[in-house]
Structures are given as C-alpha cells and as structure tokens.
C-alpha cells in the first residue's frame, strides 16, 4: 500500500525509535554477556599480551559454539587463524616502531632548530639589553605634572633595592621625645613597633629654613617628609592658575608623607612664613621602614589571628583589615593594663606573655585572682559591648607582655559581626567568678 502524503516523516521517526530500542536490547542480550565473560577471563589470567589473549579467547568461544567450525567454510583451523592474527599483530607493532622512530627524528631536528633559534634570540636580546642598559641614564628629577595613577616604588638597574641601613643623626633625649610624640599622631607611624619608631626618629635630619623659602612645590616628586620643630608654614594649592592657602602648619605637624606613601606627586606646595626648624626623613628610610613595616605587620598579625578561635570564621579580607587596624602595647611585670571601675575604651588580645585578671569582690578587701589570659586570649570586650565600667582589673603576669589593641570605634566597626560570639563567651567570666 502506498504511503499517504505527510506520513513519511512519522514512519521514519517510528522506525528510528524502534531501531534504537532494538539495538539496545541486542547489546544487552547478545553483546554484554560476551564482554563480561571476556573481561572476567582477562582479569583472572592477567596476561602479558591482553590483545592476543582476547583474540585467542574469542576464537575458542567461537569454536565451542560452532562445533569446531569457525572458518566460515574456508577450511582454516583455529590454530592457523591465530597464527595469522599473531603475524598481523607483529607486523603492526613493527610498523608502529618505525613510525615512532621517524617521529622522534623529526622532533629532534625541530628541537635543534628551536634550540638554535632560541639561543640566537637570547644572545640578541642580551646584546640589546646591554645596549639599553649602557645608554639608559639615571631617571631625571623633574616636574612631570599630575600623574594618572598611583604606583609602587619601581626598582631596576638604576634603582637597585640593596641591603639597607638607616642613617643616624644624634639628638638629645628631649628632641627624640618631641619627634616621637609628633609622629605617633600620624596614622602612618602609630602602628610601628617601638624599635622601628626609634629608628625613624634617629634617621630624621635637622633642617633650618628661612622665611619665604618654598620647601615643596606642587607636582614635584616626593623625596622626603618633614616634622615641624619650630616655626610656621603655609600649605598652598594651585587651582585655575590661582594659588590659595589651604592649611597652616605649626609646631608638631607632619607634612609631605602622603607623596612618599602613595608614590605620587606633591598635592600642594609648602612655604615658610617665618624661620623654621624642621626634621627631615628621606624617602628611602620611609619606604624601607614604614612601608615594609606595614606589610610585615599585616602578614605577622594575620597569621597570629588565624590561630585565635574568635576569628576562625572571618574571611581573608576582614582578617587583613583587623591586622592593619590593631596597635601594639607592651607592659612589664605587675603593670596595670585596665583598672576595675574605669570606663573601657580598648579591646585586647594577648600576643606574648600572660595577663592576670583580679577583681575586688568585697569593698575594702584585697582583689581576688579570677583568671589568667594566655597567648591568643582576649579581654576588655565587656565594657565595650555593654557600655559599662571595667568589671575587673588586669595586670601583666610576665616580665614582658605584648598586646594587640583595638579602640572602641574600630572594635565596633570591625568586630560587629562577632558581637554575638563575644556575648556568649562573656559567660566564661561568670564561671570564673563562681568557681
């Protein structure tokens, strides 16, 4: 019967679907049993030549199934067929070896050519580098105008980063104390270790400037920063071809440090209104101590804070933010760190040594020891969480105690997500009080 118009595609679809089902059924019923038996035999025997073993096994299975006649009427025995197959396998292996040898020869020649080319290119590059290096002068110092981006300090053949020893300029103890006090007010220096701050103070060089002298020109590269010991200076900024005083600098002020920190041009000019005595810190010392100290501090305190259970679930960015924000305090044996009844403004984490918490339980009676804060322990959070006076006093329990500190504002900003954990952990103080 002729097919009706439009029925061809439907019939083909049914045929395809039916064929796929039939193929699947054929594989399941006919092929899979043979393959499973073959794989089982290979795994049991583990032959050195699996391909020959599988061919032999299949021939033997065919012989047993066909009553010994597997030649298809050609009069060829199983042994003869296996021999023929083995010869064919041997011929193919030889052919494979020849092809691999030819490929190796071609690869070897290519490598030689590539090696010669690479060596020639390297020698040419070295010659070019030598020409460039010989012809390249030290970068000139000139006013380049505003730059489009802020970059790190660049080091190259003309600006090698070698071992560094900070300069030392002798000063009286009074001068050292004044410089240190000025620097501590700047966020850049407030996080320095005591030894690092002392190095910076000793590296400051005295500079006397007469009235009317311009110390810094807007747009110039920053080569040093200054601390004002005596005198008054004006900070001037040029906009629309007009220069205006934007700030007056007096004794104790620090200026010029931002151009060093961000490696950018001077944002404004500075001019003396009257004779001034300044302390000047050079770029190299600033970079090697202040910048490097900031990076070392972040790495060191991040690594330490990761080991503190309180910060176990804080992500990397938050950890680095806290590491940047913490300041360091040092205390000697029996020195009072916080006093019972005072208003709390600081949160502490023990970095080195031990601290002992003591509390006056009955007025007029000596304080009782409540607990010991070891490395990694924190204290002082209750007064910040509850806005209450200190519930106990804490003293240094070791000859040398070093603490990481966060002020109230930073504590609230950075540790807000941990407030629930801190409140739960506050129960440890109640347990210590009842034990």
Image (spheres, rainbow, N blue to C red):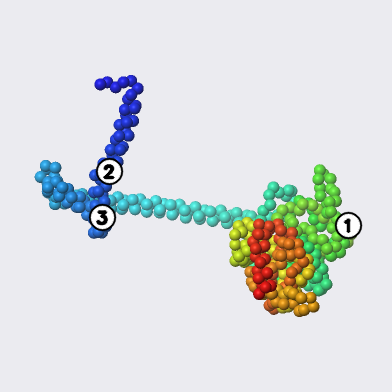
Q: Which residue corresponds to mark 2?
A: 27
- For residue 201, which quarter of the picture? bottom right
Q: Disc 1 marks which residue?
A: 273
Residue 412 seen in this snapshot:
yes
Is 354 left, or right, of 23 in this rendering?
right
Report the Cα–Cα distance between label 1 and label 3: 99 Å
Residue 331 seen in render: no
Which residue is at 84% across, 54% downward? Answer: 247
Labels 3 and 2 touching (C-beta < 8 A): no
Which circle's residue, 1 or 2, is located before the other in the chain?
2
Query: Mark 1 and mark 2: span between their CA atoms?
Result: 99 Å
Label 1–label 3 contact, CB within 8 A = no
The percent position of residue 366, horizontal first and vertical second, equals: 76, 79
Residue 392, disc = none
Residue 164 lies in quadrant: bottom right
Give the mark nearest the N terminus, 3 or 2. 2
Q: Identify whether 104 is placed above or below 201.
A: above
Which type of secondary structure does the marked residue at label 2 adopt? helix
Judge whether 37 appears above or below 163 on screen: above
Taking the image as shown, residue 1 lies to the left or right of residue 391, namely left
Q: Earlier in the sequence, mark 1 or mark 3?
A: 3
Residue at figure coordinates x 71%, y 49% from the top left: 147
Toward the viewer: 80 or 98?
80
Which is more toward the observer, 342 or 54? Answer: 342
Q: Residue 189, image x and y in percent?
A: 74, 64
Residue, disc 3: 40
- At 25% from the left and 21% from the top, the residue drawn is 1
Q: Residues within 10 Å of mark 1 (few under 14, many from 20)?
A: some
Residue 353 position within the rendered picture, expressed as x and y whole percent measured from the top left:
66, 74
Disc 1 vs disc 2: Cβ atoms closer than 8 Å? no
433, 227: nearer the viewer:
433
- Residues at marks 3 and 2, CA–CA distance in whole angstroms: 18 Å
């Amino acid at each position: 019967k002729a097919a009706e118009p439009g029925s061809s595609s439907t019939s083909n679809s049914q045929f395809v679907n039916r064929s796929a089902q039939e193929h699947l059924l054929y594989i399941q019923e006919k092929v899979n049993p043979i393959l499973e038996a073959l794989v089982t035999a290979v795994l049991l025997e583990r032959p050195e030549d699996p391909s020959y073993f599988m061919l032999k096994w299949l021939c033997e299975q065919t012989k047993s199934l066909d009553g010994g006649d597997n030649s298809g009427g050609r009069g060829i025995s199983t042994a003869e067929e296996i021999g023929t197959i083995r010869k064919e396998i041997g011929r193919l292996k030889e052919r494979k070896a020849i092809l691999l040898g030819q490929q190796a020869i071609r690869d070897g020649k290519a490598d030689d050519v590539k090696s010669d080319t690479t060596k020639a290119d390297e020698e040419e590059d070295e010659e070019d580098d030598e020409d460039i290096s010989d012809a390249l002068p030290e970068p000139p110092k000139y006013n380049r105008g505003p730059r489009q981006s802020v970059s790190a300090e660049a080091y190259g053949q003309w600006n090698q980063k070698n071992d560094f020893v900070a300069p030392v300029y002798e000063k009286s103890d009074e001068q050292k104390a004044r410089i240190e006090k000025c620097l501590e007010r700047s966020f850049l220096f407030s996080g320095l270790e005591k030894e690092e701050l002392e190095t910076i103070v000793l590296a400051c060089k005295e500079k006397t400037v007469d009235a009317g002298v311009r110390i810094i020109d807007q747009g110039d590269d920053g080569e040093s920063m200054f601390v004002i010991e005596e005198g008054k200076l004006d900070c001037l900024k040029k906009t629309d071809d007009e220069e205006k005083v934007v700030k007056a600098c007096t004794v104790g002020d620090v200026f010029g440090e931002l151009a060093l920190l961000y490696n950018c041009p001077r944002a404004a000019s500075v001019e003396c209104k009257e004779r001034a005595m300044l302390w000047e810190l050079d770029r190299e010392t600033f970079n090697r101590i202040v910048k490097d100290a900031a990076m070392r501090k972040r790495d060191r305190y991040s690594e330490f804070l990761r080991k503190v259970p309180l910060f176990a679930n804080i992500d990397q960015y938050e950890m680095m933010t806290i590491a940047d924000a913490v300041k360091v305090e040092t205390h000697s044996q029996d020195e009072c760190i916080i006093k019972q009844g005072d208003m709390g403004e600081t949160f502490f984490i023990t970095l080195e040594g031990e601290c002992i918490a003591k509390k006056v339980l009955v007025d007029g009676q000596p304080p009782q020891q409540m607990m010991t804060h070891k490395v990694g322990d924190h204290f002082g959070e209750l007064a910040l969480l509850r806005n209450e006076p200190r519930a106990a006093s804490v003293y240094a329990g070791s000859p040398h105690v070093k603490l990481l500190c966060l002020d109230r504002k930073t504590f609230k900003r950075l540790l807000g997500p941990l407030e629930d954990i801190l409140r739960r952990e506050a129960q440890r103080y109640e347990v210590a009080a009842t034990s």
